[in-house]
Image: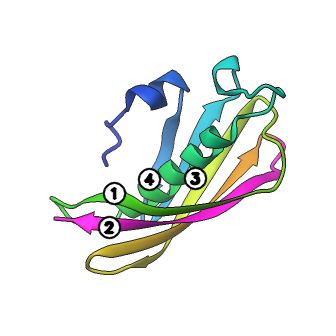
């Protein structure tokens, strides 16, 4: 994954990768109607996307030329409803082997409160 990569879904929810270096990452999305559920909170799938992208960007930041990753496992723990004007996902790598990488991620609201935390595993493909 390079910083130039933007999926149509990322574009739809205005997701931006603001940091992806040295096994760490940060991604943000503004809280807008496109990401809300029926209760007016950020939809759980969008929060899961933030953890997936944050953890994946952290891993991608340390890949060798020609390597790419695919998510093999994603675990999310929701702590608080997603509210505010902006939510931020932060990822950091925990392990990178030859074919598997694992990273942890957290999502925060604009008041700095933890909304969700999780982990993801990625298969490394040459």
Callout 2 environment at 10 Å: few (<14), some (14 to 19), or many (20+)? some
Residue identifier under label 2:
123
Mark 2 residue element: strand
Find residue 70 and name its label. 1
Say what secondary structure mark 3 lies in. helix
Q: Earlier in the sequence, mark 4 or mark 1?
A: 4
Residue plotted at (55% across, 59% down): 91
Instruction: Please say whether residue 123 is one of the residues in the magenta stretch.
Output: yes
Which residue in the protein does label 3 denote? Answer: 51
Q: Are marks 4 and 1 in contact (CB under 8 Å)?
A: no
Counting other residues with Cα less than 10 Å from the Cα at mark 1, is it few (<14), some (14-19), or many (20 or more)?
A: few
Along the line of sight, the residue nearer the viewer: 108 or 19? 108
Which span is picked out in magenta? 111-126
Please report contact status of discs 2 and 1: CB closer than 8 Å, yes or no: yes
> Is 9 situated left or right of 34 in this image?
left
Of pointers 2 and 1, the one earlier in the residue sequence: 1
Mark 4 and mark 3: Cα distance apart in space? 13 Å
Mark 4 and mark 3 lie on one chain; the one further toward the N terminus is 4
Q: Residues within 10 Å of mark 4 (few under 14, many from 20)?
A: many
Q: Which residue is mark 4?
A: 20
| Residue at x 83% of width, y 43% of height | 81
Rendered residue at 63%/20% (across/down):
34
């Amino acid at each position: 994954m390079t910083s130039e990569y933007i999926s149509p879904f990322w574009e739809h929810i205005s997701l931006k990768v603001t940091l992806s270096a040295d096994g760490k990452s940060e991604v943000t999305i503004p809280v807008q109607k496109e990401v809300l559920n029926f209760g007016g909170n950020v939809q759980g799938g969008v929060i899961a996307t933030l953890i997936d992208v944050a953890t994946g960007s952290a891993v991608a930041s340390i890949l060798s030329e020609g390597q790419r990753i695919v998510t093999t496992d994603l675990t999310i723990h929701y702590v608080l409803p997603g509210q505010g004007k902006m939510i931020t996902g932060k990822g950091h790598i925990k392990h990178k082997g030859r074919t598997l990488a694992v990273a942890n991620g957290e999502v925060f609201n604009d008041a700095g409160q933890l909304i969700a935390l999780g982990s993801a595993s990625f298969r490394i493909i040459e």
